[in-house]
Structure formats: structure tokens, C-alpha cells
Image (tube, helix red, strand yellow):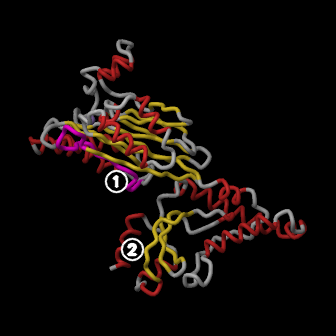
């Protein structure tokens, strides 16, 4: 199963007092959505424009139109500017990326207006996904400037498109296939103006472990280069669960016992017995070992039943796949060693592959669970992240 790891950082820089950049790092209604907006306009108006835009994106549901959301943000910025003359003339750029598609063909959709950028790092190569809507970028496209000349051009911050400039806003959007180990980066010009692309590439390519390290290193590089503008960097890594986990699901189809699609049951207190997850892993391991050694006839006899069971599970999985492809949108609670643990994903392990991962351990003991929360834990109801956080807060208080 593919999943996303992400980290975003923003900083006012070394010269400006205010930070007019805003960002969205997977904390909207669509948790696969990431965005950077770079506000324009004095007296904190830029901040207002960029945060209006991020607020609109935060409310986007999976599947909502990017263009429509950007147009809505544009309308709200214009309206806010009309109602408050201190805000008149404010505007913002935006670059946004979200991840969807199918397990076989995952995609990233990227939309932008202005000169905030998206890049793709794949196999150590850095490719721009967006083309700036700026004067110098247009001069580069027409052949009047080279990319290198553009990066030092005195008018390089002059953008030709922004939200808040006009009743109509033209949004550029593109869809690109992505795969495991791709890294998508969104940034404001506070990074791309200060740090050459070669250096951006080098930093991204030499810190593969997690998204936080390269995001912080890029910020540091921009600050060290002068930090004359607000700097925002969002790094999104596309990951795949370990090959071992994947294999145990796909190759052991005939050998693994019936798929476990029933609910998790309560576990014994810590230390007395392995958790269900551990038991399940052990069962998978022994199933793998048994395979090939055991008498073939045993498998053949039950093959019909198992095939049907797997077929049903596969149909269910395929139906759920688009919603849960990125494994990041649903949460549930369970007990592990007598402790309440929040998991991300689905409470099933069809074909022996866990569709979830541990998200947060709580130190809340089974005996401390009050009504009405007992049901939330034992019935594995699915929640959004916000709901899960609220339940955990309630349980603690
Ligand atoms: Mn900027």
C-alpha cells in the first residue's frame, strides 16, 4: 500500500517582519492535499490573502475541483478587499498538489497560479512541475532570457497572475503519474529565488530518509543565502510498505488461512500474551513456512472455498481502494497489551496484509475507558483524524 509522508516549514526570513506565506500540509479535509500560498500586499494584507486561499483548500473534499476551489478563493479575496480598504490590492500565489488515482496508477494533480513552484524529485533528478506566471518566466519561454539570467533578473518577482487581481483567474493544472520513492516539493519564491536549482536538487537527493530533513535543510540554505523573503517548503514523500508485507499478501494467496476481515478483539493485558497484530504476523510467518512443505492435497481440498473468500475480499478491497489508497484518511482505536492505541487505515488484514499502521500510543489503560467510549475501541468505528484526536482528548480528561 502506498502512503504519504510529509513535512512543511515556513519562516519569515531574515529581512521581513511578517510572514505572508501560508501552507497546508495534509491537515485539510482531504489529507492528500498540500499547498503553499505567497501573499502580496502591505500591512498584513498579503497574509490575509494567502490564508483565505489555504482556508478554502483546507475545506476541499477529495474529488472536488481544484479550479473551482481556486476560483472560490479568488472570489473571497476580492470580497474581503472590497469590504476593508486596508486589504485592497491584496493578492496571493498558490501552488497545490493532491494525490489520488488507483493502486496501480497513482497520480498527483498539481494546480498553480503565480510563481510558487512544484518540483518532482525522481531517481535523483529534479523536474519542475510548474511554470511560473511571471514576467521573467515569459521572457524565458519566448527565448529572450535564459533560465540562469532569469534567476538574477531584477524584475524576477513581478508575477503576471495572482489570486485577488481580477474577477477571473486562470489556473494551470496538470496531472502526472507518480510512484513509490517519488518526492514532490512545493515552495514559495523565498526558496527558489535564494537557492539555485542545482543546490535544491542536491539537498533533496541526499536526504532520502524522511521529508523533515530536506525541508529544514532547504530552509537553512535559503536563510544562509540571505533570506530576503518569506520562505516556505513542503516535502511530500510517496512510500510503499515493505516488500515483505506486500509479498505476504500477494504471493501467499493459496497458503494463508482464511482472510481476517472480522473485527479485532480485545487483547490480554500487556506481557501476558502477544497482541493480535503479533499473533497475525506469526500466523503469516508460519503460513509462509508451511507452504511447500505441507501436503498439496490439503490445499487443493479447500482451494475452492478459499478462492471464493479471497475473491470477495478482493472485490471489497477494490471498491474501497480509491478512498483508502493512501492509507491516511481513516483512523480507528484498538487495544494492544491493554493500552488504547490509535491506528491509521482500516481494521482489516485481508490476504494477511495489514491495511493499517500504528498512529499513536496513548498510555490510556483499558480499565480507564469510560462509557460511552468503550464502544469506540471495541467496535473499531472509523473516524477522521480530527475526530480521533477529540476522542483521545476526551478519554484523557
Ligand atoms: Mn515570496
58 left or right, relative to 253: left
Mark 2, residues whose alpha carbon is within 10 Å: few (<14), some, or many (≥20)? Answer: some
350 left or right, relative to 46: right
Query: Residue 203 lies in what quarter of the image?
Result: top left
Which of the numbered marks, if any, corresponds to residue 392? Answer: 2
Residue that protrudes farthest toward the front in the picture: 224
Residue 369 within the segment the image draws in magenta: no
Magenta highlight range: 12-30
Using the image, determine if residue 21 lies above or below residue 292: above
**Quarter of the N terminus within the rendering:** bottom right
321 left or right, relative to 22: right
Mark 1, residues whose alpha carbon is within 10 Å: few (<14), some, or many (≥20)? Answer: some
Which label lies toward us, 2 or 1? 2
Residue 27 on image: x %, y %: 37, 55
Q: Which residue is drawn at 34% across and 41% down?
A: 219
**Which residue is disc 1 drawn over?**
59
Residue 117 on image: x %, y %: 37, 34
Q: Which residue is drawn at 82% across and 64% down?
A: 291
For label 1, the SS is loop
Using the image, determine if residue 161 lies above or below residue 326: above
Which is the main secondary structure of the residues drawn in magenta? loop
Residue in front for this viewpoint, 285 or 59: 285
Amino acid at each position: 500500500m502506498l502512503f504519504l509522508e510529509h513535512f512543511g516549514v515556513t519562516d519569515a526570513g531574515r529581512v521581513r517582519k511578517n510572514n505572508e506565506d501560508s501552507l497546508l500540509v495534509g491537515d485539510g479535509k482531504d489529507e492528500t492535499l498540500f499547498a503553499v500560498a505567497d501573499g502580496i500586499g502591505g500591512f498584513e494584507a498579503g497574509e490575509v490573502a494567502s490564508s483565505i486561499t489555504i482556508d478554502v483548500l483546507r475545506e476541499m473534499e477529495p474529488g472536488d475541483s481544484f479550479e473551482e476551489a481556486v476560483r472560490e478563493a479568488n472570489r473571497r479575496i476580492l470580497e474581503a478587499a472590497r469590504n476593508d480598504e486596508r486589504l485592497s490590492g491584496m493578492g496571493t500565489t498558490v501552488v497545490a498538489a493532491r494525490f489520488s488515482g488507483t493502486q496501480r496508477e497513482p497520480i498527483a494533480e498539481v494546480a498553480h497560479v503565480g510563481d510558487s513552484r512544484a518540483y518532482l524529485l525522481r531517481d535523483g533528478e529534479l523536474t519542475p512541475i510548474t511554470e511560473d506566471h511571471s514576467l521573467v518566466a515569459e521572457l524565458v519561454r519566448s527565448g529572450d532570457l535564459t533560465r540562469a539570467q532569469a534567476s538574477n533578473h531584477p524584475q524576477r518577482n513581478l508575477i503576471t497572475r495572482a489570486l485577488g487581481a481580477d474577477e477571473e483567474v486562470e489556473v494551470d493544472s496538470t496531472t502526472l503519474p507518480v510512484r513509490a520513492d517519488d518526492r514532490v516539493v512545493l515552495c514559495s519564491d523565498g526558496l527558489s529565488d535564494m537557492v539555485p536549482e542545482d543546490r535544491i536538487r542536491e539537498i533533496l537527493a541526499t536526504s532520502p530518509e524522511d521529508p523533515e530533513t530536506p525541508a529544514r535543510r532547504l530552509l537553512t540554505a535559503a536563510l544562509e543565502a540571505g533570506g530576503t523573503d518569506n520562505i516556505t517548503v513542503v516535502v511530500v514523500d510517496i512510500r510503499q510498505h515493505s516488500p515483505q508485507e506486500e509479498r505476504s499478501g500477494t504471493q501467499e494467496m493459496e497458503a494463508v488461512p482464511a482472510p481476517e476481515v472480522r473485527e479485532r478483539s480485545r487483547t490480554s493485558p500487556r506481557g501476558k500474551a502477544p497482541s493480535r497484530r503479533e499473533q497475525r504476523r506469526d500466523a503469516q510467518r508460519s503460513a509462509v513456512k508451511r507452504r511447500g512443505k505441507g501436503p498439496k492435497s490439503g490445499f487443493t481440498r479447500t482451494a475452492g472455498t478459499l478462492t471464493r473468500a479471497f475473491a470477495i475480499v478482493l472485490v471489497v478491497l477494490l471498491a474501497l481502494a480509491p478512498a483508502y489508497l493512501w492509507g491516511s484518511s481513516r483512523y480507528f482505536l484498538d487495544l494492544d497489551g491493554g493500552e488504547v492505541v490509535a491506528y491509521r487505515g482500516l481494521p482489516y488484514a485481508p490476504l494477511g496484509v495489514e491495511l493499517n499502521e500504528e498512529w499513536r500510543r496513548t498510555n490510556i489503560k483499558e480499565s480507564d475507558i469510560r462509557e460511552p467510549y468503550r464502544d469506540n475501541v471495541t467496535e473499531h468505528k472509523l473516524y477522521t483524524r480530527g475526530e480521533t484526536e477529540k476522542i483521545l482528548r476526551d478519554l484523557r480528561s
